[in-house]
Every structure is written in structure tokens, then in C-alpha cells.
Amino acid sequence: MTVPATAGDPADSIAGPAAARHLLRRAVPPRPDGEVCGIEPGATEGWEYLSFHAYRLEAGDVVRRAADDKERLVLLLEGTSRVTAGVQDLGLLGGRETVFDGRPATSVLVEPDTGVEVRAETRSLVAIAAAAGGSVRRTAVIDAGEVLVESRGTGNTHRVVHHLLPPSAEAGRLIAFEVFTPQGNWSSYPPHKHDTEDPPRESRLEELYYYRFERPQGFAFARVYTKDGRLDESMTPGDGDLVLVPEGYHPVGVPAGYDCWYLNVMAGPRREWRFTLDPDHAWLMNWGTPQPTEDPAR
């Protein structure tokens, strides 16, 4: 006997091979601890490695993480905060008024088995990413002046990439970039994926995108898809929203009028970033002015 699904029935969420996997997480008003969005491993199908939480803090607010087996990256996206890692007072850090100031973010890499405290000195936007520790253990402040700033692409694939914690940096598990995409342009383009552990061709890395827009009513178009159609979600993330990429190709388009910033964080079984282009769109890699060959699809 087949029982018809009713509204809210779990059958609604598995109606077909391309059923939604809830990859778009909308921002919420600040909770009592300041959190405005977050994700933990296991929260959606295939999400295994990354923890991420963003906080809107007022002066004097504090966020703490107890010591455990995770490596953490504290990202001081807006405002100034004092960061303590274990017994080390790392001082007042940050200082950007907004993510659109043009300067890279300051961040702090915190090794496993080390607690961390962030105390806001001014109104601040702070994110904390985490993943199980790797073979490298290091606690360090990554100052804005140390970050490589790269202009990538041409025409309407032009964007600016800040290499906050690139694969070449000394770290155990985490990789992070921030990307500025002007209105009307595309990034994470041409579409690429890194969901299969097949060295040296491709590495398995899940990824998240945390969005901001210079005009807060802005939005982007994000698609996450696999070639076999098991996964095909098109989303419109807005200011403060989070998009998860557990697998598949994942281009981003930005409408006219709304300059876009997003933070990328990645983690997987190995800290190596190798990707495969969607063969249908690989010809775009050489479209217009020749593209750089290192990390070209971010």
C-alpha cells in the first residue's frame, strides 16, 4: 500500500534524484551570542569536514571556543577585536570598517588543542572556521599586509582574490580566500569541481561561500550541480547568506548594480587543491585575455 505524502512529509524532500539538499542557509538576526549563520558537519547530506559560524558583535561581546582536536581560522572581517589563543594575547586585530574597504582581512590560525577567545573592541563581523587538525600545527596571526592580492580574469570574468590562507600556506587542514566580484561579472568561473580524491588530477574538498553585498539588498546567482543530475540547485544568496558546496560544479554570477564579496573556506581529507573544469565550459578558460594558470577557477 502506498500512502500519499502530505505537506511537511519527509517524502516531500526526496521526490526525485535532483531533490534539494538545503545548500542555501539564510542569515538570521543576531542570536544572544551574536551568531548570524553557521554550519556543522553532518548538517546536510555529504557535509563532512567544515564547521563555520559568523557573528555580529557589539563592543565588549565575547566569543569563545574550548580547546579540542580542531584547527581553527578566526577571520576578523569587519571591526577590531582582541584575540587570545591559549595563553597568548595576540592583541587588537582587524580594523576594516567593511569588507569592501579594499584591504585583505586579518585572520588568526589556531592549532588544535588550543582554546580561542575573541573580544570585540568595536562593532565587528567575525567568522570562525574549523576542521579536524592535520599534520601541521601552527598558531599565527596572518596580517593583511602578508596576504597576496590577485587580479584575476578579464571583462566580465574579472574579480579580485585575497589569498587569506592558500594551499601554499603552512596549515593543517583549512584553505581560505576572499573574492570581490564587480557588478555584472562572474566568478568561480568557468565552472569547476573538487569532489573526487583522484591525485594528482583532483582533490576532495568541500567548500562554503559566505556572501556580502555593498548594497545590502543585493544578491547573486549560485548554481551547484553534478553532470549526472543527482544534484542541481540554483540559488540566490543575499547579504549574510551561506552556500554549501559538498560536491559538484559551482559558478557564481553577480547581477548589475550589486558589487559582491564572498569568503571561501575549504577542507577535505588532504590539504591540496586540485580541480576539474566542466568540459562543456572549459573553453572559457582561454576566453579573452589569457587566464593565469595557478588556481584559475577561484
Image (cartoon, rainbow, N blue to C red):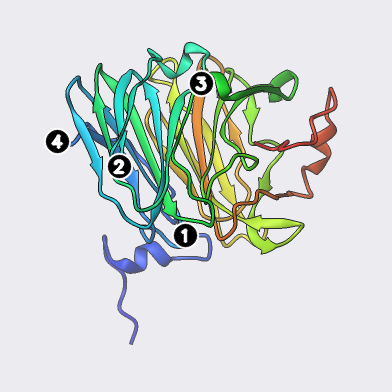
Tell me if residue 178 comes above or below residue 203 in the rendering.
above
Q: Is the C-beta separation of discs 1 and 4 under 8 Å?
A: no
| Residue picked out by circle 4 | 32
Q: Is the C-beta separation of discs 1 and 3 under 8 Å?
A: no
Q: Earlier in the sequence, mark 1 or mark 3?
A: 1
Amino acid at pointer 1: Ala
Query: Which numbered disc, 1 or 3, marks the residue closer to the eye?
Result: 3
Residue displayed at 51% across by 56% down: 134
| Residue picked out by circle 2 | 86
Q: Quadrant of residue 239?
A: top left
Q: Is the C-beta separation of discs 2 and 3 under 8 Å?
A: no
Tell me if residue 298 comes above or below residue 58 in the rendering.
below
| SS under mark 4 | loop
Amino acid at pointer 3: Ala
Residue displayed at 31% across by 69% down: 5
Q: From the viewer's perspective, is 109 left or right of 33?
A: right
Q: Earlier in the sequence, mark 1 or mark 2?
A: 1
Residue sitting farthest toward the bottom: 1
| Residue picked out by circle 1 | 19
Amino acid at pointer 2: Gly
Q: Is the C-beta separation of discs 1 and 2 under 8 Å?
A: no
| Residue picked out by circle 3 | 144
Indicate the position of residue 208 as horizontal and vertical percent values. 48, 44
Q: CA distance from mark 1 to mark 4?
A: 34 Å
- What quarter of the picture does the N terminus occupy? bottom left
Q: Residue 198 shows which numbered tag?
A: none
